[in-house]
Image (cartoon, grey):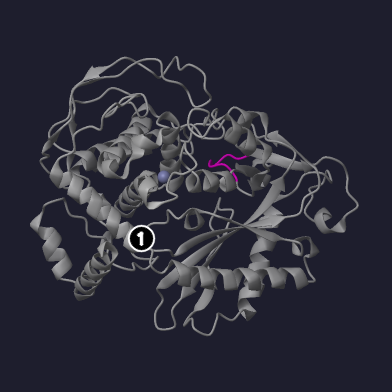
Amino acid sequence: MNNTPVKRLPRKQSSVERSSSVETVGCQLENGQDEQETCRRTDKTTDVNGGPSTPTSPRTPGHGVTGTTPMSPPPVSPKLDRWIRQRCRDLTLRRVDTQRAAKIVNHLRDGLLEFLKNNQERPYFRQATVLNSGSYFEMVKINSPNEFDMMLILPTPRLTWTDLDDCPDVFYTVSLSRPTRSNEIRSYLLQDQRTISAARIRADMRDLVCNFISTYEVPPEVIGHWKVCEAKEDCPAVTLELLREDSEEAEMSIDIVPTLEVTQGWPDAARKGPNVDNWLGKNTRRKFVSQPFYFVPKTPKGNDLSEMSRESWRISFSHIEKDIILKHGNRRTCCEGRGNRCCRKSCLRLLKRLIEGLKQRFPEELEPLCSYHGKTAFFHALSRRGDDTQWAVGNLSSCFLFLLDAFEGHAQSGLLTHFFVPSHNLFAPPAFPQGTLDFLVAALKEQRESNLPFLQTPAPAPPLNSSPSSVQLVPLGSASVTESWLSKPKAVMFTVLMAVVLGLCFI
Ligand SMILES: [Zn+2]
């Protein structure tokens, strides 16, 4: 089946030439070992963001545009540079509602914790606490601050865990180290009286949230109500949507994820990652590894799952991911003052925007793709390019192209190792089928050659349930950009508002 996006995406002649680059051997794998298999010496000439590019053979992730040790940023045309910077400003401006959104989420969080504390039916949930994680708290949420993750930490005695044969190192069955007399957790144990049932905890979490929402009242200043979304297969979260009274559009959503905290040290598979020694330093790495890690109730993808796989838990390091994104510099002062700003977070926002654009345009073809793939590629790029000066604000466009090239390299090689569990490849089937990978490679190439039209942010305040087909995508420099915006009065008003806010920012 030929389902590449080449026929379906707009093509645009490019203006920037990528200089011939010779990639070097000697890079390192994420676990710090010399890479033997995937680093190959290649000599190729490729056009950046336009023009016919030489078909590339599978490449080493992140060794395209700028190579392993870029001494100077690659050339970017003024037009493309302007486009990337404008899109980056769009993404930043859309975060003005952050405070209001945080207030609404915090009100719900406090109400939920109070409800759980007093619930009679499921005492195991009474001592739950919340770990704030996810991109809102990492401040790299894109479009609008309307999607939140809330990890609900459940108290756990000492645990042991066993790799799943179906998907080792990332998915586990989780058991109590010794029998317990606690009635609270016993109702979630399987027949062996040791193994914790992920399915039962997920189901009870859902029931509790439904009961809570049926009586919960939003703060007086909020017009709307929360709705519990239908359960999705393989999804560990209960998703809530805040609906306005006058429409079915969701203003924001929250994923509530029941979570087990483990304080006994990381599994062996995770001890080889993350590779931050040459970037954040060995001390920081030691601090990371000394922190707890988490299990969330999620099953691996696949149709022929074993009985135990259906009760499995996936490892999670979202608290450390948040830490890395907040304190991302190789110097402590990075982004702590006006003079020390870097462009790392902007690059991540842009990559997430591009991934979201691709998914909106090709929801079925790219269904397995998610922002976590972009975040992982981002961490690897930061790990390889650790110095703050390599991410100077003035080099935003070339840094983003470096990151994009790295992401494209991962897709072409079919290798995107989990940042914390280097033995796990996020681009491996069945979670990421070869057909999806081929499609992604073609779609990214198309984007690069047509000057990244999918960086265009959709119309203001898009409803969360908007149809992907309603998103209008136009190539850079096309007259239809103006036409499509002028045809939307709301968009014009938003543009004017943005201009005013921008003006204020520069005063
Ligand atoms: Zn910084």
* x, y percent for residue 77: 14, 40
Magenta stretch secondary structure, dominant: loop
Residue 368 makes an appearance in the image: no
Residue at image position (73%, 50%) is 197
Residue at image position (22%, 59%) is 472
Residue type pointed to by label 1: Asn
Q: Find out whether residue 301 is within the magenta segment.
A: yes
* x, y percent for residue 388: 40, 37
**Image: 223 above or below 298:** below
Q: Quadrant of the C terminus?
A: bottom left
Left or right of 303? Residue 14 is: left
Q: Find out whether residue 317 is within the magenta segment.
A: no
Q: Which residues are magenta?
A: 299-305
User: Looking at the rendering, which quadrant does residue 506 occupy?
Assistant: bottom left
**Image: 478 above or below 113:** above
* x, y percent for residue 461: 34, 68
- Most distant residue in the right direction: 181
Residue 129 makes an appearance in the image: yes
Q: Nearer the viewer, residue 476 or 173?
A: 476
In the picture of the structure, the residue carrying the numbered disc 1 is 143
Residue at image position (26%, 54%) is 87
Residue at image position (59%, 43%) is 317
Left or right of 387? Residue 311 is: right
**Could you tell me which secondary element the residue under label 1 belongs to?**
loop
Q: Nearer the viewer, residue 488 or 503?
A: 503
* x, y percent for residue 177: 83, 40
User: Looking at the rendering, which quadrant does residue 205 occupy?
Assistant: bottom right
